[in-house]
Image (cartoon, rainbow, N blue to C red):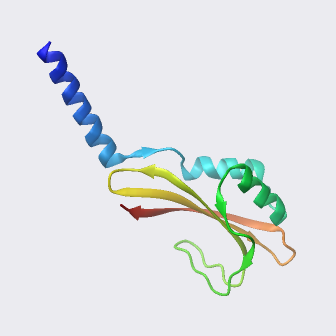
């Protein structure tokens, strides 16, 4: 009986160490990108993007114009943007990941690009 409890204790400790270091992922950038590309097509209007974001329960802004904005991956300049975020896509003991989404529109209010990037926060 002692061996069973010892084995369970060691297994539980190993699982705790593993999830503490490598965390638990609920959503990847690729899977979220696929879901977005299935439901929101290039050329879509802002209303369609916001409707999709509301259906997915994702936090988002209204469409706004950036005067000068630079993300870690792209420079948007004076673009029309809807910004959204999916929080809690990965978590470990020390880090927390969210996925930031930029929907970029042309002057005719048609979607021309979708950018996704992970954002990490220390706990």
Q: Residue at x 61, y 82 (%)?
A: 69
Q: Quadrant of the N terminus?
A: top left
Residue 91's x, y, as percent? Answer: 41, 50
Residue 10 lies left or right of residue 71; in this view the side is left
Residue 43 visible in the shown view:
no
Residue 2, picture quadrant: top left
Q: Residue at x 73, y 54 (%)?
A: 54
Q: Residue at x 37, y 57 (%)?
A: 95
- Is the residue 73 above or below the residue 66 in the image? above
Residue 44's x, y, as percent? Answer: 83, 61
Q: Residue at x 52, y 73 (%)?
A: 72
Residue 111's x, y, as percent? Answer: 79, 66
Tag count in the figure?
0
Extreme-bottom residue of the structure:
67
Q: Quadrant of the C terminus?
A: bottom left
Extreme-left residue of the structure:
2
- Is the residue 10 above or below the residue 50 in the image? above
Residue 115, picture quadrant: bottom right
Residue 119 lies left or right of residue 113; in this view the side is left
- Is the residue 115 above or below the residue 53 in the image? below
Residue 75's x, y, as percent? Answer: 61, 79
Extreme-top residue of the structure:
1
Residue 36 visible in the shown view:
yes
């Amino acid at each position: 009986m002692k061996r069973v409890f010892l084995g369970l204790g060691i297994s539980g400790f190993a699982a705790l160490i593993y999830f503490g270091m490598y965390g638990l992922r609920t959503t990847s950038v690729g899977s979220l990108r696929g879901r977005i590309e299935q439901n929101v097509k290039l050329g879509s209007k802002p209303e369609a993007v916001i409707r999709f974001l509301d259906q997915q329960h994702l936090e988002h802004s209204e469409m706004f114009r950036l005067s000068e904005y630079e993300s870690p991956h792209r420079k948007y300049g004076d673009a029309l943007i809807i910004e959204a975020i999916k929080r809690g896509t990965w978590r470990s003991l020390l880090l927390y990941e969210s996925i930031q989404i930029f929907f970029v529109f042309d002057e005719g209010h048609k979607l021309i690009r979708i950018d996704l990037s992970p954002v990490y926060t220390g706990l």
